[in-house]
Amino acid sequence: MSVTYKYRFALAGCAAALFGIFILKTTTAPMLNANSFKPDPEEGLCFVARVPESHATFMGLPMTVVTGYSSIVYKRLPPKEVARANVVMKYLPELIREAEKRLLEYANESTLMITTSDDIQNPHIWLNAEAESDAQWTIVVEMKDNDGYSWLIEFNGAEFRELWSAS
């Protein structure tokens, strides 16, 4: 084997190893960090982060993650809650379709018909700081023409728990 060939082979091996490390780091890197979360602009009583639309939308609408931690008490969201949000981000793409389907079934069985995203507003993930378990999280979807009426789609990790409505 010529020296030039050996160097090319070694260079190709190093490039492949570096590319593998790059892929590993990009697929396991957290989607959200403490800087992703900002105090709620309307209330200032919780932190909010945008879910990248390339990652997930609810019936085509952009989503946010809202935490129950007060921005009055904390200057930044605690690392434990950032980690919790990233666990939800991991499940979100596969569970969002199930949540949409369950919401449509639930609403259409009642007198509140939902047919398109024009009927809803402000879909967001609620991470309750006082939840019984760190694995509990909720997708909240507000009805557009009924101020204060929302559907809550609850999950425990990647498992659907229940869907209910509140006003």
Image (tube, rainbow, N blue to C red):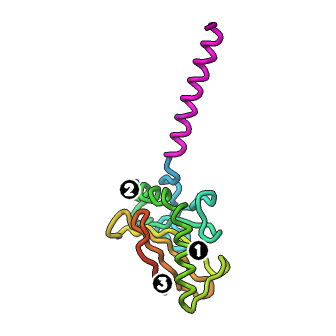
Q: Amino acid at mark 2?
A: Lys
- Rendering quarter of residue 14: top right
Report the residue marked by disc 1: 122
Between disc 2 and disc 3, whose residue precedes?
2
Labels 2 and 1 touching (C-beta < 8 A): no
Q: Which mark, by number, is residue 80?
A: 2
Q: Earlier in the sequence, mark 3 or mark 1?
A: 1
Q: Callout 3: helix, strand or loop?
A: strand
Range covered by the magenta-colored residues: 1-28
User: Identity of the amino acid at label 1?
Assistant: Asn
In terms of secondary structure, where does tag 1 sit? strand
Label 3 to label 1: alpha-carbon separation:
15 Å
- Viewer-side residue, 166 vs 99: 99
Distance in Å between CA atoms under marks 2 and 1: 25 Å
Q: Is residue 68 visible?
A: no
Identify residue for label 3: 165
Secondary element under disc 2, as helix, strand or loop, is: helix
User: Is the C-beta separation of discs 2 and 3 under 8 Å?
Assistant: no
- Horizontal and vertical percent for residue 28? 49, 45
